[in-house]
Image (cartoon, grey):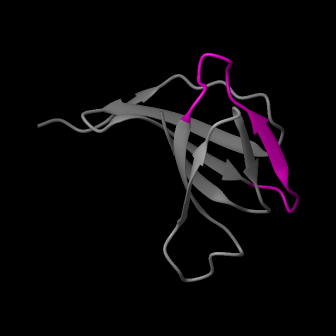
Amino acid sequence: MTGDKLVKTDLDAPGVVAQGFTGSGGKRILLVNKKNTRVEIKMPKEITTAKISCVDITTGENPPAKSNITNGTIILESFAVAVVEI
């Protein structure tokens, strides 16, 4: 079994770093908000639904918050780290 492969990832959101992965677990995008402000990210129109797991100031030491993306928009709070499963 091989590991995930990194894929070229472009994102037009200042202060947010993104890295795409593909592998046996499907397609995922790692998002890191490096800013001390809330950031809204619009997913490409081809992606209409996805699952997101996120840690930020509100999750504290609890497990990541999980939700579904149905409108193509992701909100990352200050310094949030998220994994989007496509």
Q: Is residue 59 above or below residue 2?
A: below
Residue in the foreground of this view, choosing between 7 and 63: 63
**What residue appears at the point 11 percent right and 37 percent down from the top-left corner?**
1
Residue 14 relative to residue 56: left or right: right
Residue located farthest toward the bottom when viewing the structure as drawn: 61
Residue 75 place in picture, x, y as percent? 76, 49
Residue 72 relative to residue 82: left or right: right
**What residue appears at the point 42 percent right and 34 percent down from the top-left corner?**
21
Residue 5 relative to residue 73: left or right: left
**What residue appears at the point 68 percent right and 29 percent down from the top-left corner?**
43
Number of labels in the image equals 0
The image quadrant of residue 3 is: top left
Within the magenta stretch, is there residue 57? no
The image quadrant of residue 25 is: top left
Residue 66 place in picture, x, y as percent? 53, 59
Within the magenta stretch, is there residue 44? yes
Q: Is residue 39 above or below residue 46?
A: below
- Range covered by the magenta-colored residues: 34-49
Residue located farthest toward the top when viewing the structure as drawn: 46
Residue in the foreground of this view, choosing between 65 and 78: 65
Residue 33 place in picture, x, y as percent? 73, 53
Residue located farthest toward the left when viewing the structure as drawn: 1
Q: In this view, does 61 lie above or below 80?
A: below
**What residue appears at the point 78 percent right and 28 percent down from the top-left corner?**
12
Residue located farthest toward the right when viewing the structure as drawn: 37
Dominant secondary structure of the residues highlighted in magenta in the image: loop
